[in-house]
Image (cartoon, rainbow, N blue to C red):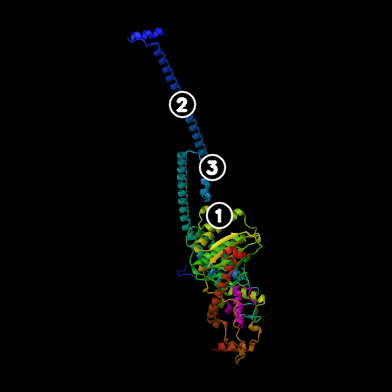
Amino acid sequence: MTDVFASIFRRYGTTAPRPAMRSAGMAALVVAGSVALARQHQRVTALRADLRNREARLRGREQELHHLITERLPALAESLRTHTVEGPGPLGTDDPSHAESLETLMRTVDEALRHMRDRVEQSATQTLTGVLATVRGLAAEQHTTVAEMQHRHDDAHVLADLYRIDHASSQLTRRLRALAVLFGAWIGQQRSTTNLHEIIRGAQAQIRDYQRITINPHAQDPGSPVIDDLGIVSRAVEPLVLIIAELLDNGARYSPPYAQVTVGFQAAHHGIAVTVDDAGVGMPLEERQRATRLLTQGSATLGDLDDPPRVGFAVVGLLAARYGCTVSVDAPPLYGGVRAVVFVPNELLTHDAPNEPASRQEPEVPAEVPTQHTSGGLPKRTRRTHAPDTAEPNTAAVTDSAGSAAGLAAWQQASTAAHTSSTGENEERNTHS
Amino acid sequence: MTSRRRARPELVRPYLITGGRAHPSRHALDLTTLVRTTEADPTTRELSPEGQRAVRLCSGGALSVAEIAAHLGTPPSVTRVLVADLIDDRFLTMRTPAQTEGPDGEILRKVLDGLRSL
């Protein structure tokens, strides 16, 4: 070894280092080597850590992706179908950039799908509305013709058939009107201000089991007035007829064929509550939730109708929101059936309805006119001095306004009573009070 | 089809008033039959609005079925069923002119002769 160094030094013309210097060089080499080794080791460790880190991130991403495919996308599809909003969120790994990309992806897919669904629904609605307008026109024409025929014909056999056609026609018209409402079309020609009792009977006429409906025109509270004095303003007549008809139909459909569906009235704070009670089997919780959602959300799409389609609650909810009524359904265990409550606010009520003279009014009984005879012996009919036909317009006008004022005062009284007893609770509480 | 605007059917349909029946429960009832109330102030609270109005109309004296129909605005066929039910429920009673002191055959013949000679 020493010889080798000596020969090297000789060859390059340098003097050989002294032995002390040689040993120092060796040490330096060793130090340098060990430093290099240590660095190497550090790098390996770092690389290993990095690898583990990347592996963990990869696993995280794989899990997140798996979660996206198996959970979130199906939930998104479901929410588009059922119109619910919330789906499961991300798993939440500490990989913000990846999470952000996935969120962007989800958002893009969601937006694209919703946009497409809306467009499909819009075009379907447009097509259906167009077709519906034609069909409604024909149905209205048929209904009018059948109605006119009933004034022309007097044969009971013909009339019996006409009644059946009229009944079917009324139901058809109601169904078409409900569909029109659902598709955002006009509900139809307005009627003039109408008595509330007549509105309920009109609704009754439009359902299949109209003979199973009992109307109790007297509010259940003893102090409450009758509804004969109450009218509904023109614009709300048809909507209210349709709302009540749908609720009556629902009540009759989901109760035994021998049971009655009862319509009642309750004075409520700032309005009147119309109650529809059936003696059916009640309503499962899921159904009730569906009904409540449709009745309160004020909007409905084709996706809300189920298969086979059930339009009742969707239509009622839409109309209620549009005209400022409130409708709720409840299954109080007390009744064993379902109670639907329609709250009609004071804004839709009027006391100027052309009401049929109320039975409570004392009829004007004229003194009996003795039958006179003609000279030939024929009984002579004399015009009664206080005949109802001549006296009616005047007395009706007077008593109507008087009854109207009395009715208004009574309603105010009942309203106040309801208010103080329930301190502003909603109409549903009042119905149970 | 006629071009004139046709009235919409009324909200309360005839079949609702008659409960779906087209045949009156009494065949003797025609448009000229006179009816009147059985008592002066009957309690009509349980009756339909049309029934209540019919009873009230008749409380002033006898009216024919045709007159009741005109006042109620219901078709005569509907009114016949309604009035027949009210008679069955003893709210109204019939007063057929022929059953009361009507003209005898001799007078009718005279009237007929008088008409022919016109």
> For the magenta stretch, what is the residue range?
B43-69
Q: Which quarter of the image is occupied by the N terminus of chain A?
A: top left
Task: Classify mark 1: helix, strand or loop.
Answer: loop
Q: Are marks 2 and 3 in contact (CB under 8 Å)?
A: no
Q: Is residue A412 magenta?
A: no
Q: Residue at x 63, y 74 (%)?
A: B45
In the picture as drawn, the residue positioned furthest to the front comes out as A20
Q: Are marks 1 and 3 in contact (CB under 8 Å)?
A: no
**Image location (x, y in percent) of residue B80:** 61, 75
Q: Is residue A97 visible?
A: yes
- The residue beneath circle 1 is A309
Closer to viewer: mark 1 or mark 2: 2
Q: Nearer the viewer, residue A433 or A212?
A: A433
Looking at marks 1 and 3 on the same chain, the residue that comes earlier in the sequence is marked by: 3
In the rendered image, the vertical position of residue A21 relative to residue A320, given as above or below: above
Looking at marks 1 and 2 on the same chain, the residue that comes earlier in the sequence is marked by: 2
- The residue beneath circle 2 is A42
In the rendered image, the vertical position of residue A149 relative to residue A377, given as above or below: above
In the picture as drawn, the residue positioned furthest to the bottom comes out as A375
Q: Are marks 2 and 3 on the same chain?
A: yes
**Image location (x, y in percent) of residue A431:** 60, 65
Q: Which quarter of the image is occupied by the C terminus of chain A?
A: bottom right
